[in-house]
Amino acid sequence: MKSLGMQFGALSDHHNVLNHEEWQRQNNNFTPIISKEISTSNGHVLQLGVDDDVIYEIPKGKERTTEKLRNEFIRICSEIRKKGGLPQVNHPFDVSFSTRYNSEFWDMVEIFESMEIWNGATPFAAGTINAKAFKKWLSLLDEGKRLTATTGSDTHNIYGDDYFGMTEWLDWLMDIVMKHPEIYPVQMNEKVAYLTWLYNKVWPRLLSWVEQSNTPSTIHNYVYTNGKNQPQEILQAIREGHSFISNGPLVTAEVNGVSYGEKAVLKDRTGTLSVHVFSKKPINHLWMYTGADKKVELCAKADVAEGGFMYDIAADELDFGDAAWVLFVADGGENNLAISNPILFA
């Protein structure tokens, strides 16, 4: 994490707080945040900033009722808050039933203070668990339910090379399939042809993502703390939404002089807008969202800067209509993407 320029991080094992003492020693120009990922019956919950082992009791047999499952979620989130921590729901649309958030429980999602909308184990592309989480997060904002959007690498080993073995194996397998048709029955030709087409179509894109993403913490949480670097100060900034997430572009934005997580006072629904983007690679679109289904493209010509590209938007009297919030997305594809938390309108 430090080698990638990060100034803070949270190391989150499943059901394990035994490494916390060693983790807390890593404090030379770096703030280690205590964390643990709790595996529940219906999803994964992150306990950020709590050194104790918060235990989720899995209901069994006749006790496994919807009421009992809901109450366990509420109880562990309350315990995390009481201990000064931040409860977060992770990858709420994960493919596995046991690791994704129960869709029946969205009415009580405000027991959490943040939500992982970008899980590093999956590209941020249409149809993925991340795209679904982003869409749901926007709809929650429309409902007035405010959870800070976060990201995490979800790497499961210290080297961050989870996918390399998988990619090498698949390359080997497809090489055999394409070069040695004599090894399978002719009635499989149609299926093999489709598999080959899919491999040629999708694999280069997926491989590009794997090569770009296969290190710990490639996707970052950028948090504004006014120079404060203690764990609780960082967590408080996350609670308040003073942050954006990115695997490339840096996006700063203000409405009437206030930024992410703050409230801007508009006059007759209008305000002054300022957006600045720096990206090492070009971005394709700079979107401004004012609702789950409301977005406009901010046209901006790139200025070539040392080491990358800069985009600047400025408007003195921009009409935000009846929006309750505004946020920004710098889109250069899944390998060059940034999503801000919202600026709220008082």
Image (cartoon, rainbow, N blue to C red):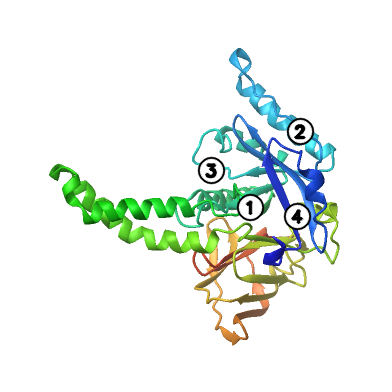
Mark 2 or mark 4: which is in front? Answer: 2
Label 3 packing within 10 angstroms: few (<14), some (14-19), many (20+): many
Query: Residue 305: percent from the left, percent from the top?
Result: 61, 86
Q: Which residue lies at the image location 69% right of the left edge and 49% below the top edge?
A: 147
Mark closer to the chain start, 1 or 4: 1
Q: Which mark is residue 93?
A: 3
Tell me the CA gap for discs 2 and 4.
21 Å
Q: Considering the numbered disc 1 on the image, is that residue within a helix, a strand or a loop? A: strand
Residue 175 position within the rendered picture, expressed as x and y whole percent measured from the top left: 29, 56
Amino acid type, residue under disc 3 in the picture? Phe
Name the residue located 57 percent from the left edge and 34 percent from the top edge.
102
- Which three-letter amino acid code belongs to the residue tagged 2? Val
Assess disc 2: are there few (<14), some (14-19) or many (≥20) residues with their C-alpha within 10 Å of its C-alpha. Answer: some
- Do the residues bearing badges 2 and 3 touch, measured as CB atoms within 8 Å? no
Picture disc at residue 238: 4
Residue under the point 77% across and 61% down: 262
For label 2, the residue is 54
